[in-house]
Image: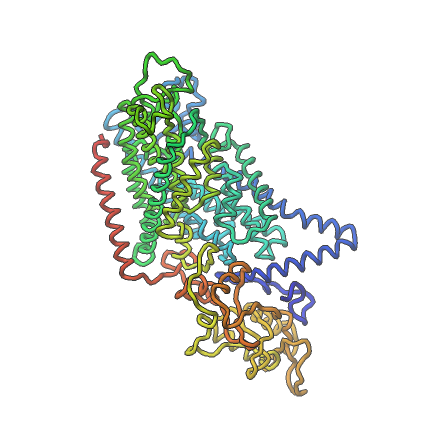
Amino acid sequence: MNGAGNLMDFLDEPFPDVGTYEDFHTIDWLREKSRDTDRHRKITSKSKESLWELIKSLLDAWSGWVVMLLIGLLSGTLAGVIDLAVDWMTDLKEGVCLSAFWYSHEQCCWTSNETTFDDRDKCPQWQKWAELMTGHAEGAGAYVLNYFLYVLWALLFSFLAVSLVRVFAPYACGSGIPEIKTILSGFIIRGYLGKWTLLIKTVTLVLAVSSGLSLGKEGPLVHVACCCGNLFCSLFSKYSKNEGKRREVLSAAAAAGVSVAFGAPIGGVLFSLEEVSYYFPLKTLWRSFFAALVAAFTLRSINPFGNSRLVLFYVEYHTPWYMAELVPFILLGVFGGLWGTLFIRANIAWCRRRKTTQLGKYPVLEVIAVTGITAVLAFPNPYTRRSTSELISELFNDCGALESSQLCDYINNPNMSRPVDDIPDRPAGPGVYNALWQLALALIFKIVITIFTFGMKIPSGLFIPSMAVGAIAGRIVGIAVEQMAYHHHDWIIFKNWCRPGADCVTPGLYAMVGAAACLGGVTRMTVSLVVIMFELTGGLEYIVPLMAAAVTSKWVADAFGKEGIYESHIQLNGYPYLDVRDEFTHRTLATDVMRPRRNDPPLAVLTQDSTTVEDVEALIKDTDYNGFPVVVSRESERLIGFVQRRDLTLAIKNARQKQDGVVSSSVVYFTEDAPQLPASNPQPLKLRRILNLSPFTVTDHTPMETVVDIFRKLGLRQCLVTRSGTELTLFISLSVQASPGYHHQEGRPATHGSNDEPGSRVHHVQLTEERRSFGLLHFVFWLIVVYCCMLLPYLY
């Protein structure tokens, strides 16, 4: 493959855009690697000429670390600002701090000298809206007014979020991780990581999370960090002019995003390696670690949680886990796998219906409707009214002597004389049973509403809602096991490890394991998930239960389908993505899927020295192929090389402008020497510099399994199929290998869906699948009806 250098003989310097890619196209990894190698070789040779060139080479070598430093600083700062803003705006729905309106509820009461320990959530400086407006904090009137204002604030926040996304940055919606995975695999989506997307995503993420919708900020923070990486790539030509090198930076930026989202720098690196990155060399591993470290240090300096800790849900359990508890841990893993399967199928069915019906034309109305339903149903239940992060934190906590939560309303023995940190198992009090009932309602609510929330036209992450579902289920299971151990300690399963009066079972640990199981069932993460969880909670001692639940949830979920939620959305949007984990089971050869087929038009090719400029322009106009093979002649069709459509178009355009004598009848030749032409012919045009002299080729009898592996491991953009050196056909689309039966021609952008989502494509759905989706939606509808009926007693 020809490397960097002058792209045309009649120009001393290469002109802009040659060697670049159009929107919705796939990069050529081999060409990008070759260009970077040539650039590095040129810098190394020049560094021996003078001191200045040596300094420039050192700056080039350190530019990658500088970019990582800048990414870590900016992403950590943005994450800290987002955390502080979300805390304030979430509390703003319920009240305001009179001494400083920009304080959240917790910050307001910190500054108060009148706060007591028993009423530490109440202070004179913080007033709910009903108390501020009417002077009454209790009563039916105050409850209704607080209820109304809670819903009103939620609707306002969500309306502002969807409006800003709709008007200024349509790419700022959703999680962003499916698109980041596709971009890192080599696909071009212009503007998805732009400055406007970064600004609008940051602002609307605060609004969306504060509205109380069942979504999180962790997934979108990966998108925000990648926008930061793309921004700083534009400052260094080493990355701005090489799409392959740019993707190395974006992989490290994704690690920094997870680092600030969960306070888990090591987990962020593993997440980038396991979940999002397509090409992850060793130097990217070190730079990802450095970016995640800087981002975590920046977030820790801001201290948005106010606890002088980096972790989001710090826990401190005082009881070890026992071998017999692996059974409920594995059962939680089974629940997580089933929940992941249910969520993926239901959410994809709903998103497909959104694309194929009139619903997709009204994204603002959809967001307002879902927000209204969420707020109305969430307010009566204290476990759904608070932010999801606060809910998970309470579910993870162990019940100490100073806890005032309903979950810790146990019947205490007045004669107990144990240390505070070693409280034995006790019988549950009325508060615990009331909390279990409310948690059961919250579980149904979270399961149903998250299906309709994820995928709307606002920033929406899935990590925290999935963890909330698992944490609720885990806490319920933990309390059940705890009470069984207390009342039936003589059973054989409890006799060996749970003596009367001992602290045997920790319900918070079950919540933590359940959260990991549900998150793993949805995303199919394993190693990175376990590391994120113990970094997130500080519970390194409980890594084995987390591993058991994560592996079980993946096994159960994989039994129903190999794709996680992000891979499912990639397929739904029609992105050309080759998952390295997919297995190609079709026993076909390259000749079975190559183009053209028997009834197709003949293959469009260029000859090496007999095609005119007019013929080339006509070929470009009449076809939409991404490139053209160059052969010796029409008769022999022996392969010489391959030329990209974009390079060919720009070369001819610039030749007409800057080279005299180039007309439509000029002969285009790709050889070293000009062909023998009559003296009356116009000046020929030499385009050998833009010719790829070493395109990747396979024979027509190569198994497709081998071809797919070649595309995956080499990151090819196209592959030529030959027989005895004669060119036969051309692979243009990665989708030919990605999914048999679905062909997406890379020469044109993927069609846009009605909801303006990049590259979205309406897929044909079989009748049986439509009926299954229709039945699933009816099931979800009746779940909502049952939930509303169960919630009626809590309205007063």
Residue 92 seen from this side: no
Decide: is 286 above or below 6: above
Report which quarter residue 499 is drawn in.
Answer: top left
- Report the residue at 32% width, 35% height from top: 384
Decide: is 124 above or below 239: above
- Report the residue at 40% width, 58% height from top: 760
**Image coords of residue 56 (percent x, y):** 72, 51
Residue 470 seen from this side: yes
**Image coords of residue 667 (percent x, y):** 61, 80
- Report the residue at 41% width, 49% height from top: 174
User: Which quadrant is home to the C terminus?
Assistant: top left
Closer to the camera in the image, 755 or 265:
265
Left or right of residue 297, residue 477 in this image: left
**Image coords of residue 573 (percent x, y):** 40, 57
User: Which quadrant is home to the N terminus?
Assistant: bottom right
Q: Which residue lies furthest to the right in this view?
A: 50
**Image coords of residue 574 (percent x, y):** 41, 59
Left or right of residue 362, residue 5 in this image: right
Left or right of residue 242, residue 566 in this image: left
Give the image's coloring scheme.
Answer: rainbow
